[in-house]
Image (cartoon, rainbow, N blue to C red):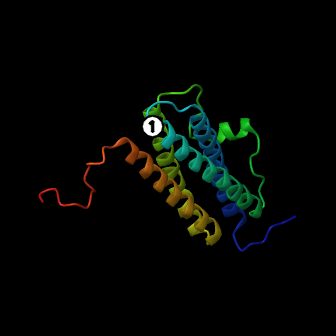
Amino acid sequence: MDVDLGIEHEARKQIAEGLAVLLADTSVLYLKTQGYHWNVTGPMFHPLHLMFEEQYIELRDAMDVIAERIRALGAVAPGSYAELVRLASVSDEEGAPGSQEMVRRLCDAHELLVRSARPLLATAEEAGDAATADLVTQRISAHEKIAWMLRSTLRPSSSRPVSEDPDA
């Protein structure tokens, strides 16, 4: 069945491919975050355990939204582990690093998703695909916020905000 959403076929194809990568990255990051939730230890166990749980639930919900947008564009959403890992730029890993390393790795992965989503946002906007542009904007915002929370976990509370005058 042909799809006529007012978005050129090639643009829809390119957008769906970009969304497939976003879905793959989100899926790998979901599994990594859930694994860290299960395996975190140390003095920060409880707050990290809870924070990782909030994050993997948010990622789980995002996967469904992204996959459904791919389908709405008339493409097939990747659905196997092999395909997701092949498409993802977020690295899959085994084992359980220390809690601070978990936080660093998750922060790096969320920042990677932000950087890789920006070109997709531009492509969607250029094609007049407001629905995908909105979805990607929301994902960028979510990943930026999570990265900020993770970075804040690594920094001492006495660090000054960027906007504060250093000479004061």
Residue 70 spot, x, y in % from top left:
72, 58
Residue in the picture at 33% in, 43% down: 155
> Which of these two is toward me, 54 or 151?
54
The kind of residue on which mark 1 rests is Met
Using the image, determine if residue 73 lies above or below residue 40.
Answer: below
Please say if 38 is above or below 60: above
Q: 74 left or right of 108?
A: right
In this view, which residue lies farthest toward the top? 95
* 44 left or right, relative to 81: left
Residue placed farthest to the left in the image? 167
Relative vertical location of residue 5 with respect to residue 30 in this rendering, above or below: below
Which class describes the residues within 10 Å of circle 1: few (<14), some (14-19), or many (20+)? few
> Residue 145: x percent and y percent?
47, 56
Which residue appears at 66% of the width and 63% of the height? 11
Tell me the residue that label 1 is attached to: 44
Above or below residue 158? Residue 104 is: above
Which is more toward the observer, 14 or 94? 94
Residue at point 46%, 42% (across, down): 108
Q: Name the secondary structure under disc 1.
A: loop
Q: Quadrant of the C terminus?
A: bottom left
What residue is drawn where x is 47% and y is 33%?
Answer: 99
Quadrant where the image shows the N terminus: bottom right
**Residue 32, horizontal then vertical, whole percent:** 59, 37
**Place of residue 123 in the rendered image (x, y in percent of width and height, measured from the top left):** 57, 62
Residue 60 horizontal side relative to residue 109, left or right: right
Residue situated in front as seen by the camera: 110 or 16: 110
